[in-house]
Amino acid sequence: MSNTANRFLQSMIAAACVALASSSHAAELTRDNGSPVGDNQNSQTAGPNGPVLLQDSHLIEKLQRFDRERIPERVVHARGTGAFGEFVPSADISDLTTAKVFTPGTKTPVFVRFSTVMGYRGSPEQARDPRGFAVKFYTEQGNWDLVGINLPIFFIRDAIKFPDFVHANKPSAVTGVQDANLAFDFFAHAPEATSMLTRLYSIEGMPDSYRNMDGYGVHAFKFVNADGKYTYVKFHWKSAQGMHGLRPKDIPGSIGADWNLMTNDLYGALKAGNAPKWDLYIQVLKPSELDAFDFNPLDDTKVWTGVPERKIGTLTLNRVPDNYFESTEESAFAPSRMVPGIEPSEDRMLQGRMFSYADTQMYRLGANFNQLPINRPRVPVTNNNQDGAMNFGDRKGEVNYEPSALNELAQNPRYKSVQTPLAGTTQQAAIRKTLNFRQAGEYYRMLPAQERQDLVTALSGDLNHVTNDANKYAMLSYFYKADADYGTRLARATHADLTRVKSLADKLVEN
């Protein structure tokens, strides 16, 4: 090599070394214990043609971790999309609640997880399915989870039916394929689902974007003020983008074009700086007003008709998570995560969710799921809960009990649960004033003509797959009882005997 070429090569090597040193904030590849990895491309072997060595701890660790990348999938709401943002209150409601998340002038960081209910991880997002709308508020009093959906009501009113509802609507235990026969076999025996089914098969039930749908807490909750007085409250997230849904004729093309349409739409908007917003509205009832209705306001299959809404704040999403698994997949929501000033109502479905959701997260993520960064409160956690898998709560000292004179933990009597009057005996009976059909008819009649027709088209499409005659006619009688025009159109669209539908509907009692 000539002297000139040699000097050129040496200068190139020197420049490369300088560039490497200066560039690099490049992170060094390490193992889980932090030790550097020397070769991530070749396993250790016994000679050039020998077997791979068990002592190659980097190889073993890498395969072990790969084999354990999946955690149990959520039974419901498995397909999810998350985003970070903030909540800003806009009204002083200290007369209603001591919850500091509503203090004017505060900003509370939030994490929101949108989801479909019945689909598996990776399933098409454009499905005839409710959409989860779960909000985790990292408040200065601890975390508050408002766990809801995009519709104001639910299918059933008692949590004892929830496993059966999910089993009937999930894929068949034999074929692994969803089956309308199974779903409507359940709904034929659950007339309280008539209103929810009507909404689900409407345009509102098939949003074209997570940004273009409303959200609801669904259940009644309690607000408790500084005087210990409580009111019942319902929450409604109203989309600032407006509500837009897909008509039945547009759904096949939407699914074929992009299985991930709703995630891509939300993340595309966030990356473009188009931050979506929702205004939070509440409805409020005094305890003395509950009996003024001819339905039970604590029944989650009912909307509170005639009760005005009041805007109290705005939610803005502004950031895509850096890591899907550590945020969206490991996020854990539970209605039991409340803060002082917010308590559960006696809604039977909510009471069941209070236990079930937190228990689900302990199964999926372990007893210490609240210590994961996405779930960790932004305030100190001080209690005597200890140990368990993956505990890194950093509890110190040998006093792991209370009360104690050695390490006293202060308690705040202001935050005791509110006293609610009780009457009667223990029982196992349905609620009074079920009124299963009227609100479905009211909703149907308020829809524009085209949306009524689209509802009939969408719902009859699934009813036409029902082969059990008794179940088909039971469903048609429910919809006819809700509204005669509604039931008549569905009977014609499903080639049913309208006289038989009317006869069955006449036997149904609204009470």
Image (cartoon, rainbow, N blue to C red):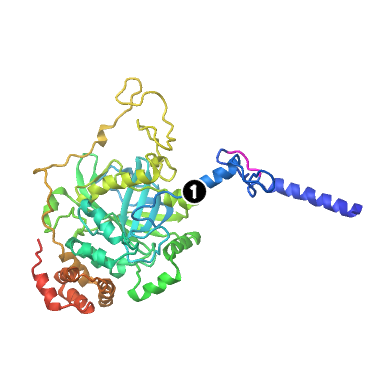
Q: Which residue lies furthest to the front in this view?
A: 50
* Residue 183 x/y as whole percent: 26, 64
Report if residue 35 lies within the magenta region.
Answer: yes
The relative height of residue 503 versus residue 215 in the rendered view (above or below) is below
In the displayed structure image, the side of residue 57 where residue 24 appears, left or right: right
455, 492: nearer the viewer: 492
Boundaries of the magenta span: 34-38
**What residue sits 39% from the left and 54% below the top?**
113
In the displayed structure image, the side of residue 354 where residue 498 appears, left or right: left
322, 325: nearer the viewer: 325
Q: What residue type is labelled 1?
A: Asp
Q: What residue is shown with label 1?
A: 67
Q: Quadrant of residue 439?
A: bottom left
Q: In which quarter of the image is residue 307?
A: bottom left
* Residue 364 x/y as whole percent: 38, 46
The relative height of residue 385 versus residue 375 in the rendered view (above or below) is above
Can you see residue 182? yes
In the displayed structure image, the side of residue 500 where residue 125 appears, left or right: right
Q: Which residue lies furthest to the right in this view?
A: 2
Q: Quadrant of residue 454?
A: bottom left
Quadrant of the frame with the N terminus: bottom right
The relative height of residue 451 versus residue 164 in the rendered view (above or below) is below
Report if residue 153 lies within the magenta region.
Answer: no
Q: Main secondary structure of the magenta part?
A: loop
The 10 Å Cα crowd at callout 1, few under 14, some 14 to 19, many 20 or more, is: few
The secondary element bearing badge 1 is classed as helix
